[in-house]
Amino acid sequence: MKRLAITVLMLASSVMSAGAGDRSYVRPSLPGGDGPPFSGAVRVGDTLYLSGDIGLDENQKVPATAKAEAKLLLDGIQATLKDAGYTMDDLVTVTVYCSDVVHYADFNEIYRGYFKKEFPARAFVGAGTLLFDARFELQAIAVKR
């Protein structure tokens, strides 16, 4: 519990120290538009907060296998990070929501290939049904190294 409180304090501190004027958006959606009611990521200072994302194919469908879905998901996360000037190695914490934890090993097999340095902190949460019947949804926070 103490570690959680310290983590929350650190995250709050990083948001407050950056100031409201030091904010930018990656793939933003605006109220009144056709897009989803969230932005792909929000940068505050050196910290990038990534929205939850899922791995859909070019037809907006979930791939047939967990590994293919994990690859599409992680390719998308990597692209969002790149658009903001970050890399996968800038991730500090990742939360993976999974429709069935039976996919844990398949996800990890693909996930390992996206990092050159230390892995970020991570939670892998059995979440039940996800949007579009996806197996995985990933949300993360990155800080420039």
Image (spheres, rainbow, N blue to C red):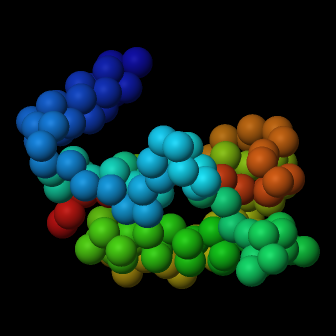
Instruction: Give x and y (percent) for residue 63.
Output: 84, 74
Residue 79 position (above or below residue 102): below
Q: Quadrant of the N terminus?
A: top left
Q: Residue at x 63, y 69 (%)?
A: 73
Instruction: Give x and y (percent) for residue 143.
Output: 25, 57
Q: Residue at x 58, y 55 (%)?
A: 35
Residue closer to the observer: 131 or 97? 131
Number of on-image labels: 0
Q: Residue at x 18, y 66 (%)?
A: 145
Residue 83 as seen in the image, left or right of residue 56: left
Residue 31 position (above or below residue 109): above
Q: Is residue 67 visible?
A: no
Residue 7 as seen in the image, left or right of residue 75: left
Residue 108 as seen in the image, left or right of residue 93: right
Residue 26 as seen in the image, left or right of residue 132: left
The single residue placed furthest to the front in the displayed view is 32
Residue 77 position (above or below residue 51): below
